Image (cartoon, rainbow, N blue to C red):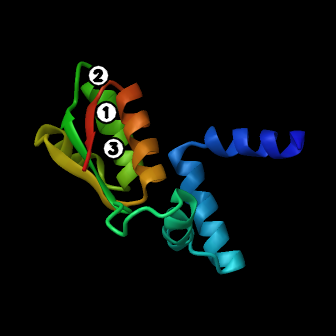
Amino acid sequence: MADLKDFAEQLVNLTVKEVNELATILKDEYGIEPAAAAVVAGPAAGGGETEEAQTEFDVILKAAGSAKLAVVKLVKELTGLGLKEAKGLVDEAPSPIKEGVSKDEAEALKTQLEEAGAEVELK
């Protein structure tokens, strides 16, 4: 049982980059679509929730905060955009960083951006 708790803690502490790598490995090597698995598991775990539960979220950058350079670098890393495009996204806040992502990924992105000093909203 202790091994499962250690494993769960490792999963919870993954960075967004590591989560994306894990999703790629699950898809490519095992044929598992992580987003589809979360959608299927969602209602069953809820014990009779309505079908209107939100499964996709948009991560919206509301403001860069005081550490704008750190936020631009993080947006560049998270989105795969070039430096100029990432800076444009940050300068045009509020602007979407990622759209249609799972709740877990959206929460992870929000946490990383907030740690960098940004103000973030999930929709």
Q: Which residue is mark 2?
A: 67
Give the distance between the C-alpha atoms of the residues marked 2 and 3, in whole angstroms: 12 Å
Assess disc 3: are there few (<14), some (14-19) or many (≥20) residues with their C-alpha within 10 Å of its C-alpha. many
Q: Amino acid at mark 2?
A: Ala
Q: Is residue 1 left or right of residue 40?
A: right
Q: Which residue is mark 1?
A: 71
Give the distance between the C-alpha atoms of the residues marked 2 and 1, in whole angstroms: 6 Å
Q: Which residue is mark 3?
A: 75
- Between 113 and 34, the one lying in front of the other is 34
Q: Amino acid at mark 3?
A: Val
Q: Are marks 2 and 1 in contact (CB under 8 Å)?
A: yes
Give the distance between the C-alpha atoms of the residues marked 3 and 1, in whole angstroms: 6 Å
Nearest to N terminus: mark 2 or mark 3: 2
- Between 15 and 77, the one lying in front of the other is 15
Total labels drawn? 3
Q: Is residue 94 left or right of residue 80?
A: left
Residue 34 occupies which quadrant of the picture? Answer: bottom right
Residue 50 percent coordinates (x, y): 37, 65
Q: Amino acid at mark 1?
A: Val
Q: In the image, what residue occupies the spot 43% across and 35% down?
A: 112
View extreme (left): residue: 92
Residue 101 percent coordinates (x, y): 38, 60
Which structural element holds mark 1? helix
Assess disc 1: are there few (<14), some (14-19) or many (≥20) residues with their C-alpha within 10 Å of its C-alpha. many
Question: In which quadrant is the N terminus drawn?
Answer: top right
Q: Are marks 3 and 1 in contact (CB under 8 Å)?
A: yes
